[in-house]
Image (cartoon, rainbow, N blue to C red):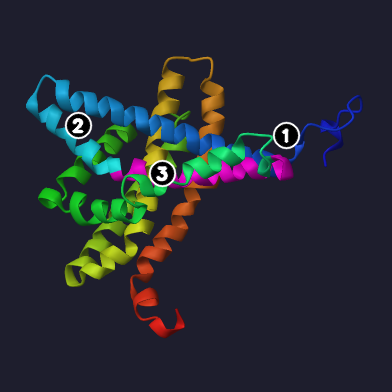
Amino acid sequence: LDPAKQDPDATADNILVHPDVRRMLLNIKSTNEALRGLAVYLGIQLDLSHSHPDEAGRKKADDIVALLTPIIKSYGSERGFANISEAMQVMGGAGYTQDWPVEQYMRDSRIAMIYEGTNHIQALDLVGRKLPRDNGRLLRAFQNEITELIRACKGDEQMKPFIDPLKAESKRLTEVTMAMGMKAFQDPEEAAAAASNYLNLFALVTMAFIWARQVKYAVDNDLPNADAKKQTARYFMDLVLPETDVYVRRIAAGKAPMMDYNIDYL
């Protein structure tokens, strides 16, 4: 499409010159790197829950692990499957054939959404057990992590494109959590109906937190991949994180659209 990117000496241009191919690959890259970062973050918290020198530190780490485990299990498997599907799409018809391993990855990964309890069960665990525990103690522990990161980046212009979206979305997550909790207090089915959408909302905000941490570390330590981290994180903040809007609307709709539906129509 852009003559400046065409290679007149090649029989065909590399497909990376196409904007939609870049979109698909960056969807995969930005979410995979965030989920891998989340897995490492949880691994560190798991170690701290056993080896932190004081009991309060061990308790806080254990709370964060308990809160985020259903998120990495559910959203990680769901997004992972979607990313493999998108990788297949990048390859076109060749991706669907057994000449390449992508189609095998796609079939193999499908079990992950079922294997350790279906993803909806993970969502019910999050909203029904983890959020209410000790009047929200687990959630407060993680919110403190986000708040500490935001404060640590105050006044840093390089971090502003990553901290501002994180701050806005974490605030909205708190508001949605409170509203859902009030509905659930009156009717437990409200939380159950919203659970999967809520988990995905929570996951996106968590990934924004992980991306901000990765960028800060890369910039503070002048790592050779700092610019790449910033670019990928910027893509996530601009084009993946806005998916939260959809989940917020779905959660607000509550159970009525599904529970009032005439079962005969199913």
Residue type at the position of mark 2 = Ala
Q: Which residue is mark 2?
A: 61
Kind of residue at disc 1: Leu
User: Counting residues from the N terminus, which is met first, the one under dot 2 or under dot 3?
Assistant: 2
Q: Earlier in the sequence, mark 2 or mark 1?
A: 1
Q: Nearer the viewer, residue 187 or 233?
A: 187
> Does residue 59 appear left or right of residue 87 in this picture?
left
Residue at position x 40%, y 81% from top?
261
Residue at 24%, 36% (x, y): give it.
Answer: 65
Number of numbered markers: 3
Q: Which secondary structure, mark 1?
A: helix
Alpha carbon of mark 2 to alpha carbon of mark 1: how far? 42 Å
Residue on which disc 1 sits: 16
Which region shows up in magenta? 70-94
Q: How many residues crowd around disc 1 within 10 Å: few (fewer than 14), some, or many (20 or more)?
A: few
Looking at numbered disc 3 in the image, what kind of residue is underneath it? Ala
Instruction: Out of 9 and 159, give the one closest to the viewer.
Output: 9
Which class describes the residues within 10 Å of circle 3: few (<14), some (14-19), or many (20+)? some
> In the image, residue 7 lies at what x, y percent?
86, 28
Residue 66 quadrant = top left
Residue drawn at the location 10% of the way across and 49% of the way down: 134
Could you say which is closer to the camera, residue 70 or residue 208? 70
| Earlier sequence position, callout 3 versus callout 1 | 1
Residue in view at x 51 percent, y 21 percent: 226
Q: Nearer the viewer, residue 114 or 237?
A: 114
Instruction: Judge whether residue 168 can be spotted in this image.
Output: no
Give the label, 3 or 1, closer to the camera: 3
Above or below, comparing residue 249 to residue 37 in the picture: below
Query: Does 63 appear in magenta?
Result: no
Q: Which residue is mark 3?
A: 112
